[in-house]
Amino acid sequence: MKRLLRPLPSAFLLGLALPAAAFALDPTGWKNRQTVNVAAPGLVRVTLPADTLDAAQLRAPDLRLVDANGQEQPYLPEAAIDQPRETRRPLSFSVDLTDTATQLTLATGTTQPLDSLELESPHPHFLKAARVEISSDRTNWTAVGTGVPVFRQWGAEHLRLPLEGRTAAYVRVTLDDFRAPPVPFTGAALQLAADYTPTLTPLEARIARREEFAGETVLTLALEGRHAPLARLEFETSEPLFTRRVTVATRVLHDGTAGERTLATGTIYRLELEGLPARAQLGLPLDLAPDTRELLVHIHNADSPPLAVSSVRVLRRPVSLVFHAPAAGRYTLLSGNPQANAPRYDLAVFARDLRRANAPVINPGPLQPNPGYRAPEALADVPLTGAALETDGWRVRRPVQLTARGVQELELDIGALAQARPDFADLRLLRAGLQVPFLLEQPDLSRSLALTLVPDNDPKRPTFSRWQLKLPRAHLPLRRLVFTSSTPLFQRSLRIYEKIPTDRGDFYDSALANALWSRAPGLTPQPLTVMLADTPRTDTLLIETDNGDNPAIALAVSQVTYPVVRLVFKAEATDEITLLYGKPAASAPRYDLSLVAGQLLSSERNVATLRAEEAKDEGFARGALRGLRGGPLFWGALILVVVVLLAIVARLLPKPPTAA
């Protein structure tokens, strides 16, 4: 439905112009300007393009409008928003079961147009096809939708059924139970249709980066600008049959560590098979205005292959400002002053009337630099260097490979994760003897290892099954293990542990996790995900289960994951930077990055990589002792020392008396 506008009385506009006393404005603090040409005096609505919102501060507190004489003109900001949709419970809700279907019938209790119906179910995992019908007398039914998917799988769900803005006294939903047993539904909620929905505007966006992690795909969306109120993401894919849970996040700094903040979550799906009505939901609703030019889109694949996404379309809400032009002519819109506070104009008193008023719409001219702008000192251009570092005690040095200047992203590999401290307090970046400040980023992402279980049964325990899992490194901070089995019927308790050597030469068991796993015929086989309680200290894990009087089960590991840890810093392409780690006594560094942390996290990044470890010069004595440790030279030197000591003791002992 279109938005209703009405003209304001001339007496009101005259009164509006009187308190709008103009004040001279010094434009030297504003970086950008745009021309606004007004054809006739009166109320004017100026549409703000994406580059204007990007140049301004978040929520645009620094926008100023001046006339040809430099006099400031009051304005009222206006952002189009969806009208809140009212949600209400139905008057009645009943469930009827047949041999092949579950039928839900509810009385709406309203004569207003209905937008959708949301079902409620406690069941964690199901997939159904629904037929939706409406009626005014509960006798004659009209179909609204057939074959509508209703599901909850792997964190993704779709329980909302569209009613297309129709009015109905009764709604009936028939769920097909022919291929799967019935699912309990405990209630429903009706959402009324809105009177007004704003027309959305596309915001240019591109997939700047695609990364595949364990069980999920991460798309980095580069947006045309910041600060635009986003309303929706639309995914382009050729996949005919899929369902995925999608999470949208942005990078943030929390307690000195870079991470992610979730902004929105939802489900996308498509059902496009021959003989069935095509169904799809490829859009994800948003309600946010990001302070960065990028969004992180997580597509959770679980055990499915990565989804082929060709593009992502971003839609934003239109933003404008309304002002009363005292005369026709050229006005100037100023933006880009980080020190400006939001203005307080008397027009806010008339906000409701102004937003409903009919006014000509003007598009401002292109964004141009303000010739009188006096730029403050840019903190982002200051070289990011830290204090000098005494490198004694750091066991590992690894050169960093850079490809371009600017903000760098360095992900730690398996070797660095295994040898660094668990809290990563010993990480240092070094350039020409000086530290390079960095942000430690620990997103909720994982990498996967391709490992295989090897049977390792103990002949002394015939009822037990045991497997060995060989890791690439000891002290590797594993996050989770995912097991699968082809055995159709079993119930087992899995024990995951490792054998730790002692000073006496024997071993003791160190438990890492315990899990109960069961499977019955007729149910969808589910893998077992086990989270480890601690970081393994060795490179060998043992998985054990007691079969009792049952046959042994088949066991395989489908996924072994470890966390993603990154360092974010700024450098030139020609810089020779070294990563140091492996000092247990090191304390966490403290860098003054608070002023530029937001710029580092939101800037486009270059991917830096780690080279092989360097041999560190520790001096002859320390190197010799390190080489002797545990090798043949060590035992040879030990025997030589013992022989020399015995010879010295023999010479010091008193000699026996000489025989007469």
Image (tube, grey):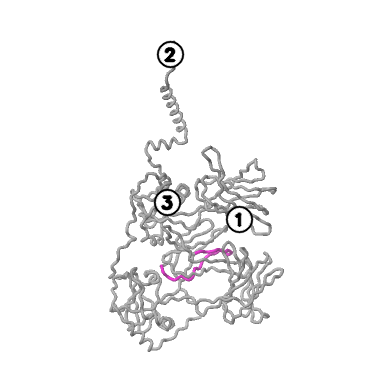
Q: Return the disc, 2 or 1, that comes first in the chain's sequence.
A: 1
Image marks 3 and 1: residues in contact by CB distance under 8 Å: no
Q: Would residue 303 be counted in the magenta stretch? A: no
Q: Principal SS element in the magenta part?
A: strand
Residue 232 rendering spot, x and y as whole percentages: 49, 70
Amino acid type, callout 1: Pro
Circle 2 residue: 658
Nearer the viewer's eye, disc 3 or disc 1?
3
Chain-order first, disc 2 or disc 3: 3
Q: Position of residue 69 (x, y in %)?
A: 28, 79
**Residue identifier under label 3:** 425
Q: In the image shown, does 129 or 627 lie closer to the viewer?
A: 627
Alpha-carbon span between mark 3 and mark 1: 35 Å
The reply to whether residue 427 is visible in this rendering is: yes
- Indicate left or right for 275 with 57 as reference: right
Name the residue type under label 2: Thr
Vertical placement of residue 44 versus 291, above or below: below
As shown in the figure, which amino acid type bears the numbered disc 3?
Ala
* N-term mark: 3 or 1: 3
- Please tell me whether mark 3 sits on a helix, a strand or a loop: loop
Dot 2 alpha-carbon crowd within 10 angstroms: few under 14, some 14 to 19, many 20 or more:
few
Residue of label 1: 527
Q: Which numbered dot is residue 572?
A: none
Residue 90 image-quadrant placement:
bottom right
Q: Quadrant of the C terminus?
A: top left
